[in-house]
Structures are given as structure tokens and as C-alpha cells.
Amino acid sequence: MPKMKSKRSAAKRFSFTGTGKVKRAAAFHRHNMTHKAQTVKVGQRRAKILEAGDAALVKLMLPYR
């Protein structure tokens, strides 16, 4: 049987932790940052963990994680 293809758009946006949780980047952190508070910008630097329902969909898109 041939290999399954992963969704390349998902592969570029998500990664996995050692325990299998799905990491994502924070939204609203690309441009127009001058009017945002410093605490908001600092909080958006760290990676976020997807909720369980969304993580299940991502795991279907990335079969060889």
C-alpha cells in the first residue's frame, strides 16, 4: 500500500510535544503591534496547546507525526 500524504498546510502550522500534544503559534502576532499592550505581546510569544477536539483533527491531517 502506498504511503499516506500529510496535509502540508497543517504540517507547516502545527508541531507536537514529546507527550503527543499539538502546539500552535499565537494569533494576532504578525503586524499592527504598536497599539497592543506589552503584556499581550509577551504572552503571544509562547506556543499554545490545541484543545482536544481540534488536536484530534490535526492528528488526522498528519499521519506520520
Image (cartoon, rainbow, N blue to C red):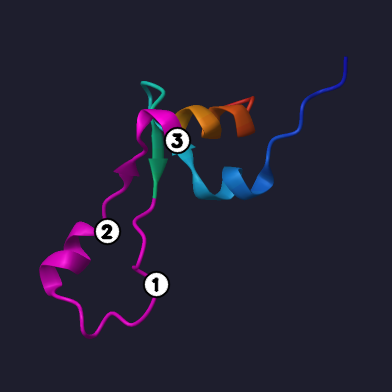
Quadrant location, the N terminus: top right
Residue 40 occupies which quadrant of the picture?
bottom left
Above-or-below relation of 58 to 63 = below
Do the CB atoms of the residues marked 3 and 2 lie less than 8 Å apart?
no
Q: Give the label, 3 or 1, closer to the camera.
A: 3
Do the CB atoms of the residues marked 1 and 2 lie less than 8 Å apart?
no
Cα separation, mark 3 vs mark 1, equals 23 Å
Q: Residue at label 2?
A: 45
6 vs 40, left or right, is: right
Above-or-below relation of 51 to 41 = above
Label 1 CA crowd tier, 10 Å (few <14, some 14–19, many 20+) = few
Which span is picked out in magenta?
25-54
Above-or-below relation of 47 to 49 = below
What residue is rendered at 36% in x and 61% in y?
A: 27
Cα separation, mark 3 vs mark 2, equals 21 Å
Q: How many labels sit on residues?
A: 3
Q: Main secondary structure of the magenta part?
A: loop
Question: Is residue 46 shown in magenta?
Answer: yes
Q: Residue at label 1?
A: 30
The amino acid at mark 2 is: Arg
Whichever of callouts 1 and 2 sits on the residue coming sooner in the sequence is 1
Q: Residue at label 3?
A: 54
The amino acid at mark 3 is: Asp
What residue is rendered at 68% in x and 41% in y?
A: 7
